[in-house]
């Protein structure tokens, strides 16, 4: 739960994040994000989600990701569709970080896993 004192914090310098993962496809990642963020998906080899405020989240190919998926509890090699890099819009308020953390939890529940 976001502390009410933090909801209105504005960052002095806006920033965005890039997170790489596998376990689910770029398209599935965008579907999860669209559902959570109430956005619209633009599909293709890379996918984007436009949220009601007009900001975009991108789910793009990243060659450095080793594409894997879990099948019956085992990790197996997957197609390049499983090489995912999530690019956020610019974060300007603390609440943006909180929403991103919640989205990451939703992606994990959908099968995404992140390298350490």
Image: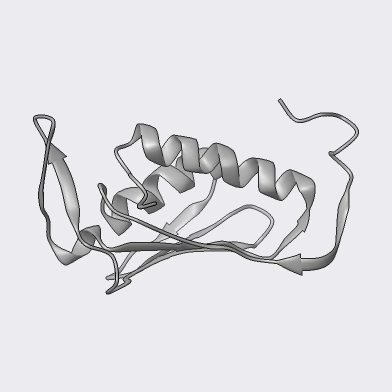
Front one among 115 and 4: 115
- Residue 81, given in percent of the width and then of the height, sits at 21, 62
Q: Is residue 105 left or right of residue 98?
A: left
- Residue 31, given in percent of the width and then of the height, sits at 38, 47
- Residue 70, given in percent of the width and then of the height, sits at 16, 39
In the picture, which quadrant includes the N terminus? Answer: top right
Q: Residue at x 57, y 63 (%)?
A: 56
Label tally: 0
Residue 5 vertical placement versus 34 (above, below):
above
Query: Where, by quadrant of the figure, is residue 64 drawn?
Result: bottom left
Query: Where, by quadrant of the figure, is residue 6 drawn?
Result: top right
Front one among 110 and 76: 76
Q: Residue furthest front?
A: 116
Q: Residue at x 87, y 55 (%)?
A: 10
Q: Residue furthest bottom?
A: 63
Q: Is residue 22 left or right of residue 35?
A: left
Q: Residue at x 33, y 44 (%)?
A: 113
Q: How is the image coloured?
A: one colour
Q: Is residue 34 left or right of residue 14?
A: left
Front one among 44 and 79: 79
Q: Is residue 78 left or right of residue 38?
A: left
Residue 20 vertical placement versus 69 (above, below):
below
Q: Residue at x 67, y 41 (%)?
A: 98
């Amino acid at each position: 739960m976001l502390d009410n004192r933090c909801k209105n914090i504005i960052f002095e310098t806006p920033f965005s994040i890039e997170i790489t993962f596998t376990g689910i496809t770029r398209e599935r990642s965008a579907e999860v994000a669209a559902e959570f963020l109430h956005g619209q998906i633009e599909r293709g080899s890379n996918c984007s989600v436009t949220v009601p405020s007009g900001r975009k989240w991108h789910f793009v190919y990243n060659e450095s990701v080793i594409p894997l998926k879990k099948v019956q509890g085992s990790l197996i090699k997957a197609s390049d569709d499983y090489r995912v890099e999530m690019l956020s819009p610019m974060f300007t308020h603390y609440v943006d970080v909180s929403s991103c953390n919640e989205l990451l939890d939703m992606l994990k529940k959908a099968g995404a896993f992140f390298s350490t």
